[in-house]
Image (cartoon, grey):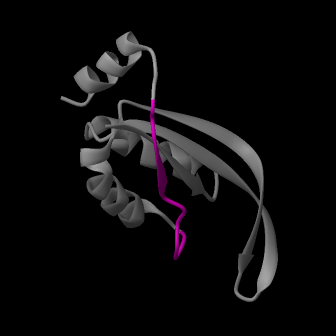
Amino acid sequence: MHIIIFVTAKNKQEAQRIASSLVKSKLAACVNIVDKIDSLFFWESKIQRTKESLLIIKSKKGKFSKIIKLVKLMHSYEVPEIIALPITSGDKTYLRWIDAALR
């Protein structure tokens, strides 16, 4: 099953390091980085606000546990966001490209 994974990072440099490692290790076919998103979240008993970078990772469910390990190893946050959503449909040519890129 193909999946999309969201990971937020403290800045663009951290996001680029993680993205590069994911693609080089064939855990991700593609990673988009959206820089300077506004994040609002509850942490340490209060509402926090910060600018972050969002990684949008295209991969497969079978690689998710390895992705979690790599992200946690490289990430600066104590509890990084690492969530996956299934791709329920998509262009067959693109999905085949993901498969080929992950071999």
Give how far across and how far down residue 81 sits, in percent. 54, 62
Q: Name the residue rendered at 32%, 51% in the picture.
A: 64
Q: Which residue lies furthest to the bottom in this view?
A: 45
Q: Name the residue rendered at 75%, 89% in the picture.
A: 45
Q: Name the residue rendered at 27%, 55% in the picture.
A: 66
- Is residue 82 depicted above or below 29 in this figure? below
- Is residue 33 depicted above or below 18 in this figure? above
Q: Which residue lies furthest to the left in this view?
A: 103
Q: Residue furthest front?
A: 88
Q: Nearer the viewer, residue 1 or 43?
A: 1
Give how far across and how far down residue 4 sits, in percent. 47, 40
- Is residue 78 depicted above or below 39 in this figure? below
Q: In the shown orientation, is residue 65 left or right of residue 20?
A: left
- Quarter holding the N terminus? top left
Is residue 72 found inside the magenta-colored segment of the image? no
Q: Nearer the viewer, residue 76 or 60?
A: 60
Q: Which quadrant of the structure image shows residue 73?
A: bottom left
- Quarter holding the C terminus? top left
- Is residue 58 depicted above or below 6 in this figure? above
Give how far across and how far down residue 76 sits, in percent. 52, 67
Q: What stretch is highlighted in magenta?
A: 77-88
Magenta highlight: main SS: loop
